[in-house]
Each structure stands twice: as structure tokens, then as C-alpha cells.
Image (cartoon, helix red, strand yellow):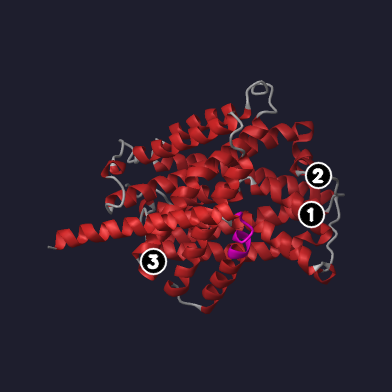
Amino acid sequence: MKKTIGPLLLSGLMIGPILGSGVIILPPLAYGKLGEASIWAWVLMMILGALFAMIFSKLSVLHPGNGGMTIAIEEALGRRLKLYSSLLFISAVSFGPSAVLLTAAEYMHGFSLFGRIEKPLIAILLLFVALCILLKDIKFISILSFIFSTMITLTLIVSSILVLSHNAVQIAPLQSVDAMTFGQVALLLFWGIIGWEIVGNYSSQVRDIKTTMPRATIMSVIVITITYLLIALAMQSMPFTESFSLTHIMQAVFGSNASSILALFVMGLCLCTYLLTVGAAVRLVFSLAREEYLPSGFQRTNRQAVAYRGLLYFTIVHMFLLMLTYFMILNIETIVAIANAFFLLNAVIGLIASLKLIDGVMYRIAALILSVCLLMILSFSAIEIFVALGVVFLLAVTMDKRRAKKDAIKSE
């Protein structure tokens, strides 16, 4: 695959998906629970988010390739856990992105053009749009994501600054906050920093990775931190109501059109998230096929060097899940619960690997804290989720044993 991504375009791939729908949903939730002290939770999350980003950026530089952080996991923890991590990520992406499309469809349904179309059908329409984009080369996708990310973040930052210029911010002292409530909100806001572990799957297409990856990560962390903190402060300058949302802030720029613009932003953010996660998973499938863990047919690429058979697999699975939601056999909450568990455990394995591979006390303390936080979130999953995690582990063991037999036959 061609090395075509520089720092600016790589940051475009990072910012939009990592902000995702979280930038729309999380700030009002935090303000509703912590009130004028919510900014402290955001400061904590942004610090942890920066550490999270630097850890996985470092792993990508040390062990680049289409396999992403699974390459580092194999180095630190062995082939079996590398396979387990790979299958966890593939399983997560088999479910999660369909929920992302449904979230976008929820907002698009408010437009008169889509008002009479069922939400799962709108999501299927977006699925085909995403498929067409993902069949293009990575430079085109990066430019598109960069444009989306720039438009959205600039609008949110300008809107927040305008609100702050007309309103005084009230900040409650941290010691006035109930520790239990603060902890619950902190866990909730953790979703705002998930996503950095995926970027490594694009490392084989990054120019001069030793400089590009750190620069892109620093740029992205700065933009994401400024965006979240300004939104949080702008919200704290306004009275909270049950219907309070990001629309109230965007009215400073767009007036009565704020809700429509917000819907377009959600669609753009969700599309960026879909492109990043599915694109990363396709690269991982390609990598596993080259290592003979998956059928060799997944190595086939088109003229744009896209491994299209892996892409078709995810498209078909997402189409199937969206049809199940259309017939009300499945709902978005179930899809999210399943995907989240796979994503969380995969990230924990990556963080544990970083404890062994990355030098530096700060990195190791951060990785340990992040691992504990993610495991705490995972502990709230239903028993069926843990069964699914166990089944995936057994599949990884089976694949590892089959590969060991192949290697033994070749060496004879």
C-alpha cells in the first residue's frame, strides 16, 4: 500500500472519528450531572485522552503495519493474544459501525427529505455511500475526513467562543463535588477518548512515520482538547434545562437553523467514524490473510490498493444487522453493548502490551490507570457479553493451533 498520508491528513483521519457523536451527546450529560463542576471531569478526561493518544501513537511508531497495535501485542504478549486482539477488533467492527449509521439516521430523519423513510433504510443508504468512499484510495478518504473535521471543529469552537463572550462562566470548586457522582461521570466521559488505538492500522500508509505520527497525534490532541473544553465552558455559562443540547450553543452562529446544521454535523461525524473504524478493520483482515490466518482471498486489492473483499464482508454484515433492526429483531442498544465490550477488552490488551514495550514511568502509570478504568466499564456488561468474549478467545486458540500445525508441516 502506498505511503501517501502526511501529518495534516492523518490528523484529519483522527479528529472527526474520535470526536464522533460523543461531542454531541457527552457535554450535556456531564453538565446535567455535575453542573458548574463538570469542567473538572473534562480536564481529567482530556489529560487521560492525551496519554491514551501518546501511548498508541508510540506503539504505532515502534511496530508499524496494517495489523496496527496487534503487531505490538504479538511482540509483548505472544501470537495467541495477538490473534485474540485481532478477532476482538474484527468482531467489534462487525457490530459497532452499524450503530454509528443508525445514530446518523436518527438525526437525518428530521429532514423532510428523509422524514418518510424508515431510519434503518436511511442507515443502509449511508452504508452504500460509505462503501463507495472506502473503495477510493486513502488520500481521498483522508482529505474528505480532514474537510469534515475542520468544518465541524471550527464551527463548534467559534460558537463556543461567541457564547462565552456574552456569558460569564461559573465554575464550582472541585471539593464541592460528590466523589461517587464525579467517578460515574468520568467513566461516562471515557467514551470521548476511545478511538486512538485504531490509528495504528493506517501506519503502513504514513510517510516518515517517526515524525508524521507524533506530529499528527499532537495536532489532533490539541484540537480535540480545545473543542471539548470550550464546549464544556460554554454550556456552563448557560442555565441547564432537561432539553439542553449542543443546539443551544450553535444558535449563537446559526440561529433557528442550528438544529438542522447539527444534524448535518452528526451525519459527518458518524461517517468519519465509520470510515476510520471499517478502514482499519479491512487493513487488519488484509494483514491476517497475508499471515495465513484468514483465507488468501482477503488479500485481493483494487487499483486504489483497497482490500475490497474485507470491505465487502463488513458491508454485508452491517447490511444484515440493519435489516434486523428494520424488522425490530435487534435494536441499537444491543448492538452498542456487544461492540463496546469487544472494543474495551481489545484496548485493555493493547495497554497491557504497552506496559512491556514502552519505557517511561509516566507512560506506564497512564497505561495502568487507563486499563483499570476500561475494565471497570467492561464489568457492567451482561453475562452474555462475557460468553461472547470467551467464544472469541476459543476461536483465537483454534486458529493459533492450526497455524502451529501448518508451520510444523512446512519445517519437516
Q: Which residue is drawn at 30% across and 60% down?
A: 401
> Can you say whether 397 is above or below 19 in the image?
below
Which residue type does callout 3 highlight? Leu
In this rendering, the label closer to the viewer, 1 or 3: 1
Q: Position of residue 9 (x, y in %)?
A: 47, 48
Q: Residues within 10 Å of mark 2 (few under 14, many from 20)?
A: some
Name which residue type carries label 2.
Phe
Residues 192 and 150: in front is: 192
Name the residue carrying label 3.
Answer: 62
- Which residues lie in the magenta part? 375-382
User: Mark 2 or mark 1, which is nearer the start of the sequence?
Assistant: 1
Coordinates of residue 335 in the picture (x, y in percent): 57, 43
What secondary structure is marked by label 1? Answer: helix
Quarter where residue 189 is shown: bottom right
Name which residue lies at 48% across and 54% down: 198
Crowd class of label 3 (few under 14; some 14 to 19; many from 20; radius 10 Å):
some
Q: Identify the element where label 3 is drawn.
A: helix
The residues bearing labels 1 and 2 have C-alpha atoms spaced at a distance of 9 Å
Using the image, determine if residue 109 lies above or below residue 10: above
User: Upstream in the sequence, badge 3 or badge 2?
Assistant: 3
- Is 230 on the left-hand or right-hand side of 36? left
What residue sits right under mark 1 in the picture? 31
**Quadrant for the C terminus in the image:** bottom left
Proximity of marks 3 and 2: CB atoms separated by less than 8 Å:
no
Q: Residue 399 carries which label?
A: none
Q: How far across and how far down the image is residue 389, in percent?
A: 49, 56
Amino acid at dot 1: Tyr
Residue at point 67%, 48% (across, down): 23
Circle 1 Cα neighbour tier, 10 Å, few/some/many (<14 / 14–19 / ≥20): many
The residue to which callout 2 is attached is 244
